[in-house]
Image (cartoon, grey):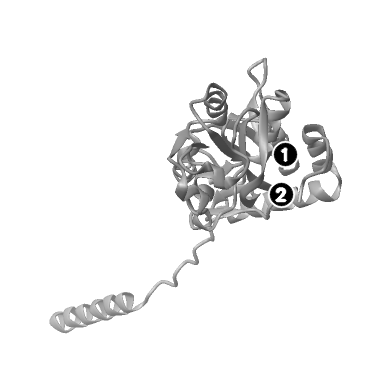
Amino acid sequence: MKKYVSHLLVALLAGALLTACGKQEAPVAATPAKPAEISKIVVGLDDNFPPMGFRDAKNELVGFDIDLAREAAKRLGVTVEFKPIDWNAKEAELGGKRVDVLWSGLTITEKRKAQIAFTTPYLENRQIVVVTAASPIKTKADLADKVLGVQEGSSAVEAVEKDQAGKTVKSLKKFGDNVTALMDLSTGRLDALVVDEVVGRYYTAKKPGEYVVLDEHFGTEEYGVGVRKEDVELLGKLQQAMDDMKKDGVATRISTEWFGKDIVK
C-alpha cells in the first residue's frame, strides 16, 4: 500500500511540473518610449559672418540669424545657446551632437540635404563678385588667370567650381572667414572675392568707394535652418515658429532692422 501511494505521489508531482512548464506567461506590452522634452537648443554658427552672426564692439554675439533664432527659441519655450564652430566642419559638429541646429546663412544644397534636414527657405541669396574700385575686372570672363578668394566650407566654393568662369581662374584661395579675405583683397593678394551677397553688401556699404560689386554673379541660392535628419520633432517646431514669425510680422521687423527692408521669403 505504501508503495502504491508513493508511486501515486510521484505521478501527481510529475503532472504538476509538466503543466507548469507548459503554461506560458502572457508577454507584458512594452511601454512606448516617450520623446524627451526639448528644453534647450544649441545653435552652431560662424561668429564672423556679419550681418547674419558676428561679435559687436562689446564682444557679444549679434546678427540677423541670431535675432531670428532667439525669437524662435522664445516661441518654443526653450533656452538657446549659441556656439561658434569651425564652419568648414559644420556637418561633423551637427552629426556629433555638439550642436543641435545650424543657423548661420546656411545654403540649402542637394549635397547638404543628404546629411541635413532643412526648414523651408527663409532668405534668398546670391554669390556675388567683389573687387576693388581700381580693379580692371568688370565681368566674370575677366577672372581668367586671376586669384579668386572664397570662404572655406561655404557654398561659394561649390558655386565657383561648377561655373565655367571658375575653371579659368589662376587659383582659388580659401579663407577661414570673409573678413580676412576682404583684407587680402584690399592689399592686392587677391584679385576678386566671391561671397554671399548679404555679407558682401554689408561690408562694402561700410567702406563706400573702396569696393565694387560686379553685375554678374555665381548663382542664386536659398538659406534654411538645418538639423539632424532624425530630429523630426525639433524640425517641425522650428518650422512652425518660422511660419508664425512671418505671419505675425516679427520676421519682417527683424529683417528691416538689419537690412532696411523685408527680404524674408
In three-dimensional space, the C-alpha distance between marks 2 and 1, rounded to whole angstroms, equals 10 Å
Which residue is pictured at 62% across the width and 46% down the height? 37
Which picture quadrant has residue 213? Answer: top right
Residue at 75%, 42% (x, y): give it.
Answer: 75
Residue 241's spot in the image, x, y percent? 74, 48
Dot 1, crowdedness within 10 Å: few (<14), some or many (≥20)?
many
Secondary structure at badge 1 equals helix
Q: In this view, does 78 lie above or below 110?
A: above
Q: Are marks 2 and 1 in contact (CB under 8 Å)?
A: yes
Marks 2 and 1: which is nearer the front?
A: 2
Q: What element carries label 2?
A: loop
Q: Which residue has dot 2 on it?
A: 122
Q: What amino acid type is highlighted by mark number 1?
A: Leu
Q: Can residue 212 be seen in this view?
A: yes
Sequence-wise, the earlier of marks 2 and 1 is: 1
Which residue is situated farthest in the top direction here?
58
Q: In this view, does 28 lie above or below 264?
A: below
